[in-house]
Amino acid sequence: MPTDAAHARYPLSQGVNPWLVTAAVMLPTFMEVLDTAIASVALPYIAGSLSASNDEATWVLTSYLVANAVILPASNWFARKFGRKRFLMTCVVIFTIASFFCGAAPTLGVILLARIMQGAGGGALQPLSQAILLESFPLAQRSMAMAAYGLGIVLAPVLGPTLGGWLTDTFSWRYAFYINIPVGILAIAMIHRFVHDPPYIKHAKVGPFDNLGFGLLCVWTGCLQVVLDKGQEDDWFGAVWVRWAVVALVVALVWWIWRSWSNPDGLVNLHALKDRNFRTGCFMIALLGMCIYITIAMLPLYYQEVMGYTAFWAGLVVGPRGLGSFIGSPIIGVLGSRIDNRKLLSAGFLGFGACAMLFGSVDLNIGPLTLLLPIILTGFALSFVFVPLATMTTSTIPYKEMGNATGLFNMLRNIGGSVGISMATTAVIRRSDLHQTYLAGHLAPSSWLLQQKAGMMAGFLSHRLGPAAARPGSYGLLYGQMQQQSALLAYVDVFRWTALLAFFCAAATWLFKKPPKHGSLPPGVH
């Protein structure tokens, strides 16, 4: 039992050193966010192993994000009903078991079901961890607490591709999921030892579960994801089922908003959006989700699909972002209490946008070290984005509303990430076709340059394939080069659009009200 002296020293964490609480809750959070990105470099291998296309394999990422997002708003109710500690441990157990089924999946359908189960189990980990951290530290130390949280959130999706690539090349893509099993067991032990429920959770009076609100949430998020994932295959609104799915999406979304606003005992209390900083933060986190998950998903695919890298080398090339995160997180933890967080946030988005522009300047001659500096700076910039954003968004939210607020905040990040991945995947497919059509228009059969190149290739191939097959083979090689160039231009377009979105976010940062001084409590905080 904690002593009186311990209670006096650590009043919010019930006698436990808050850094031990931080380690306990960050382990499952790190594991959950890591799993969002660890499969990104393994997508071509998953697609080949399960007889799926690359765009179908991206459903492994998006289905996880959507299932994660559905559970996020409900996490506050479950935490109050069953106790935060018990619910957190249950979620880790579900996540760990689902990880096993992901690794053992024999078909695409099975792994998608397992990923939905995994996303549902992991959905509550982030808001619960964030709420526990914010309540375990005094207000004056919130920047350091959020720096530790931000380190895990930013570092996990950065290290994920490197670890996933090494496991995929060394063993199998299935071990990218099996690795969660020992980590989950350790997380359960640490939560059981160091995490305790606050008094208001232990004695909370919880109303009935909002079945209608939860059902509506499942409908509109599910319709959104199906439309985003399958719309490209069926020419979007050219398909009747897409139009009906969009109608169901709009009806369910409007109904859910109305119910969440008018029902005080609903699944989500949208009245928190009356707070200007929280409202702005929710808007910004959705855009941040789009930016970060586009780069997480697209950059490893670019190195594998266009440049021909293995999973390990693709992960290794993008892995140095972790170095930038390691450097940036402690710096932002110190600066967060001394400098206007709006300036830090704006600088972070500008840095991220500049790096995305550099990604958009690539060509087929780049090497593994060409983008090393921009990749490191991306991790550094993300540290300056996430920590000030989370701090300002929750700065005026009362402790008792923290679970509801963080659930909604993280839900919108995942929705933004899922939308971003689907939009980027669609853009790569369509822009690649567009660029290929444009390039083909400049390669008429009578072109002397085309005939010269084809003749040179035919002369080379004739010694290996014979004169009869050399000429068709040369045109096949030229067509393959045109496809590679078209894919390159498509990825360049996506990276540049991501940069423009980041620059817009840098300007939108100033919608935040100036945060209160750390020396005084914001209104409503106890």
Image: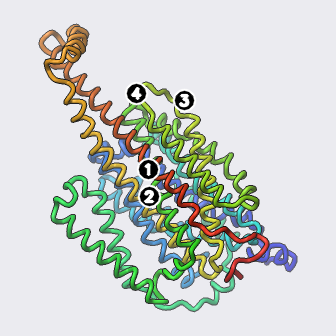
Considering only order in the chain, which callout, 3 or 2, is on the residue closer to the N terminus?
3
Q: Earlier in the sequence, mark 4 or mark 1?
A: 1
Q: Say which element carries label 1.
A: helix
Distance Cα–Cα, label 1 vs label 3: 21 Å
| Residue depicted at 39% across the width and 53% down the height | 421
Q: Is there any visible trace of residue 425 in the rendered image?
A: yes
Which numbered disc, 1 or 3, marks the residue that appears first in the sequence?
A: 1
Q: Earlier in the sequence, mark 3 or mark 4?
A: 4
Disc 4 to disc 1, C-alpha distance: 21 Å
Q: Say if 67 sits above or below 76 in the image.
A: above
Residue situated in front as seen by the camera: 277 or 308: 277
Q: Amino acid at mark 2?
A: Gly
Marks 3 and 4, Cα distance to the nearest angstrom? Answer: 14 Å
Q: Earlier in the sequence, mark 2 or mark 4?
A: 4
| Left-right relation of 526 to 75 | right
Kind of residue at badge 3: Leu
Amino acid carrying label 4: it is Leu
Q: Are marks 1 and 3 in contact (CB under 8 Å)?
A: no
| Label pair 3/4, CB-CB below 8 angstroms | no
Toward the viewer: 153 or 501?
501
Residue positioned 20% across, 61% down in the render: 237
User: Is residue 346 shown above or below 7?
Assistant: above
Task: Sort mark 2 into few (<14), some (14-19) or many (20+) by Cα contacts within 10 Å.
Answer: many
Say which quarter of the image contains residue 183: bottom right
Residue 409 or residue 505, whichever sits in front: 505
Q: Secondary structure at mark 2?
A: helix
Cβ–Cβ under 8 Å for marks 2 and 4 = no
Report the residue marked by disc 2: 417
The numbered mark at residue 369 is 3
Instruction: Please give the residue where the numbered disc 1 appears in the rendered image.
Output: 294
Disc ID at residue 364: 4
